[in-house]
């Protein structure tokens, strides 16, 4: 029998980084900016949180003296600042200097991965670890802590209440972002900037400000996905190149969800389930079959992209100015 009680929580945990990444990228793309640097942004967010947690733990004479507030606030703040810096770099290159968005995004992914591996390797050497990783279990415990009464509620508590606070924050951010985009004047202006920046500029909307704000806020949200992966999913263990391809799946999810963050909640958990489905499908001792099962999320991604490209409804299409530089002089 398929064990849904254990499968669903693991799928949710796998899907939370994807949800942070897709929500952040959706906000970015709604402004007309195509940020393919999300994998690098998530990587930088993760390593910045690790740096903050490492320095805080090293400053304590005894790990028993760790403050729950500082243990959460310091990595969280470092993650947001690092992700914000990546967003500012992207905006300066693509909005101010009008560089090609595709090339800039790919360069940010390479840059972010290099930055993460450099500082990650440096921290591993400073810690004197015998293995190529660093463990921040004291700090991770506060991120991974679930509601105290979750274990008393049986399957309901395990499925809905057994996660750290960042998992619930990811859902809340996605739902709030969806409401802002569809129900507020700010969301209307942002969508106008993404659809036709020249028209928005003629209507008195500050296009550059909206592009900067949406991209930077989106990068900060995506960076939280990297922090969640390290501090919650990986239990505070940092290893270089351990993120895999979650950043790219998050970008694909934006298309799958037709640029709607609220749809991204269930979609992220679905992809999280597909990511670990090979562990629950019997394959015996045949490793080749298991490797084929690992291809399921990528095959689904390709199928979704094909189906999405065949949609004719305007509301299911990307913003018209997505990936295009804004030249105010052309208005």
Image (cartoon, rainbow, N blue to C red):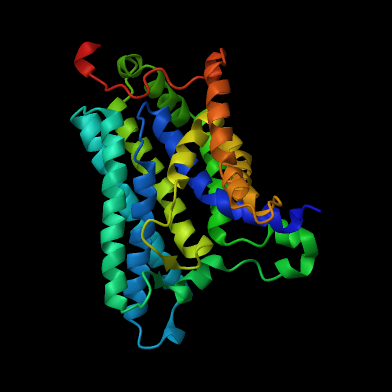
Residue found farthest to the right: 1
Count of residue discs: 0
Q: Quadrant of residue 73?
A: bottom left
148 is higher (above) or lower (below) than 225: below
Which of the two residues, 274 or 13, is positioned nearer the viewer here? 274
- In the rendered structure, the answer to whether residue 174 lies left or right of residue 69 reads right
Residue 201 image-quadrant placement: top left
Residue pictured at 35% horizontal, 75% vertical: 56
Q: Quadrant of residue 208?
A: top left
Q: Residue at x 63, y 52 (%)?
A: 286
Q: Quadrant of the C terminus?
A: top left
Instruction: From the top left corner, tell me how far across and down residue 25 is, in percent.
Output: 43, 37
Whether residue 228 sits left or right of residue 212 in the image: it is right
**As displayed, is residue 296 above or below residue 308?**
below
| Drawn side of residue 195 relative to residue 10, left or right | left
In-front residue for pair 111/93: 111
Percent position (x, y) of residue 248? 44, 40
Q: Along the line of sight, which residue is nearer the eye, 89 or 216? A: 89
Along the viewing direction, whichever of 59 and 67 lies nearer the viewer: 59
Q: Is residue 85 visible?
A: no
Q: Residue furthest bottom?
A: 61
Where does residue 224 sit, x and y in percent of width and height? 44, 53
In the depicted structure, whether residue 152 falls above or below residue 290: below
Residue for point 57% across, 55% down? 167
Can residue 305 be seen from the camera position used here? yes
> Which residue is rendered at x = 54% and y = 22% of the image?
306
């Amino acid at each position: 029998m398929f064990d849904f009680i254990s499968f669903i929580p693991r799928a949710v945990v796998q899907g939370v980084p994807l949800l942070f990444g897709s929500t952040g990228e959706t906000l970015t793309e709604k402004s007309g900016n195509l940020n393919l640097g999300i994998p690098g942004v998530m990587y930088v967010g993760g390593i910045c949180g690790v740096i903050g947690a490492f320095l805080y733990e090293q400053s304590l004479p005894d790990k028993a003296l760790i403050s729950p507030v500082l243990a959460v606030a310091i990595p969280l703040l470092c993650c947001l600042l690092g992700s914000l810096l990546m967003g500012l770099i992207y905006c300066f290159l693509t909005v101010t200097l009008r560089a090609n968005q595709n090339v800039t995004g790919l360069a940010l992914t390479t840059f972010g991965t290099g930055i993460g591996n450099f500082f990650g390797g440096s921290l591993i050497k400073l810690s004197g670890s015998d293995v190529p990783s660093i463990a921040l279990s004291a700090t991770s415990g506060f991120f991974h802590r679930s509601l105290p009464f979750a274990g008393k509620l049986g399957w309901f508590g395990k499925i809905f209440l057994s996660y750290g606070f960042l998992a619930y924050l990811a859902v809340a951010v996605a739902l709030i972002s969806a409401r802002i985009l569809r129900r507020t004047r700010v969301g209307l202006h942002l969508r106008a900037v993404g659809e036709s920046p020249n028209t928005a500029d003629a209507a008195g909307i500050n296009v550059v400000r909206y592009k900067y704000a949406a991209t930077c806020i989106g990068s900060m949200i995506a960076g939280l996905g990297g922090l969640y992966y390290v501090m919650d999913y990986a239990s505070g263990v940092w290893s270089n190149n351990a993120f895999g391809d979650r950043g790219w799946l998050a970008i694909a999810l934006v298309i799958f969800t037709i640029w709607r963050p609220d749809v991204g909640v269930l979609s992220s958990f679905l992809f999280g389930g597909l990511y670990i489905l090979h562990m629950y499908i019997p394959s015996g001792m045949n490793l080749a079959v298991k490797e084929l099962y690992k291809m399921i999320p990528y095959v689904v991604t390709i199928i979704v992209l094909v189906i999405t490209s065949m949609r004719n409804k305007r509301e299911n299409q990307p913003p018209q100015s997505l990936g295009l530089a804004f030249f105010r002089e052309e208005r």
